[in-house]
Image (tube, grey):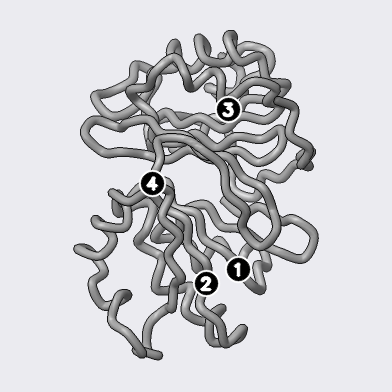
Amino acid sequence: MALQVEDKIFLIDCGPDFRSQAIAQDIRHVDALLLTHTHFDHIAGIDDLRIFCLRSQEAMPCYLSEKSQEELQKKYYYLFEKDDESVVRLNYNVLKNPRGSFKALGVSFRYFTYYQSSMKVTGYRIGNFAYVTDIKEYEGALFDDLIGIDYLVLSMQRKEGSYAHLSLRDIIDIQEKVRPQYCYITHMGHEIDYYDLKEYLPIGIAPAFDGLSFWINLENKI
């Protein structure tokens, strides 16, 4: 997912189809990367960020948990080799606490932690928008982090859920507690028909789609 704040673009995760998505959405630069976790479908396009570093002649800020940095170094060891101009250069900013806040290029973000099976995952909030993907297990404190949200993105692979993803009932329960104006479902499996799901969902929840865009308010409502 790409967030544009004035002239800066923040990318949340970088999946295997990033290159095609960037071309389709006319993304000409990426200024910072925020990683939720290191499953392949969230980091496999990371090499395609190299062109943006070459253009800017600067290392790209990357925000991630300590666990994600450890896993990324195992899977992409060459990204951590010094002075290698043949790979994307990332400037790692480790989020050491379970939740907190940080500034990236002058823009304020909040972050919080939950789990997908044994994988530690980081969710992000900016203003009245929160991105909470690959969530399965979480503590009640999550709802404190989502107070005042108007736009919420949650993930679901199948309606009935799985060991690694919420069910549709789980998403509806979270939506009813948080009460955002808009709740979008992402990470849907191939067996889900977009139009069938859209007709089935209650008011306030909709399936996301490639190219979906909306305006957010950067002011923190908490």
Mark 3 is on which residue type?
A: Tyr
- Are the residues at dot 1 and dot 2 in contact (C-beta closer than 8 Å)? yes
Instruction: Check disc 2 and report its element: helix, strand or loop.
Output: strand
Query: Gap between marks 4 and 3, in whole Å?
Result: 41 Å
Q: Quadrant of residue 203?
A: top right
Q: Residue at x 48, y 17 (%)?
A: 171
Point out residue 114 in the picture as x, y percentages from the top left corner: 37, 30
Point out residue 135 in the picture as x, y percentages from the top left corner: 39, 29
Quadrant in which the C terminus appears: top right
Q: Residue at x 62, y 53 (%)?
A: 103
Residue identified by numbered label 1: 30
N-term-proximal mark, 1 vs 3: 1
Relative to 45, is 207 on the left or the right? right
Q: Which is in the foreground here, disc 4 or disc 3?
A: 4
- Are the residues at dot 4 and dot 1 in contact (C-beta closer than 8 Å)? no
Residue identified by numbered label 3: 195
Residue identified by numbered label 2: 60
Height in image: 80 above or below 147? below
Query: Gap between marks 2 and 3, in whole Å?
Result: 38 Å
Mark 1, Cα crowd under 10 Å, few <14 / some 14-19 / many 20+, is many
Mark 2, Cα crowd under 10 Å, few <14 / some 14-19 / many 20+, is many
Q: Which is in the foreground here, disc 1 or disc 3?
A: 1
Which residue is more in the foreground, 190 or 103?
A: 103
Mark 3, Cα crowd under 10 Å, few <14 / some 14-19 / many 20+, is few
Residue identified by numbered label 4: 96
Q: Residue at x 26, y 69 (%)?
A: 76
Mark 4 is on which residue type?
A: Lys
Q: Which is in the foreground here, disc 1 or disc 2?
A: 2
Instruction: Check disc 1 and report its element: helix, strand or loop.
Output: loop
Mark 2 is on which residue type?
A: Met
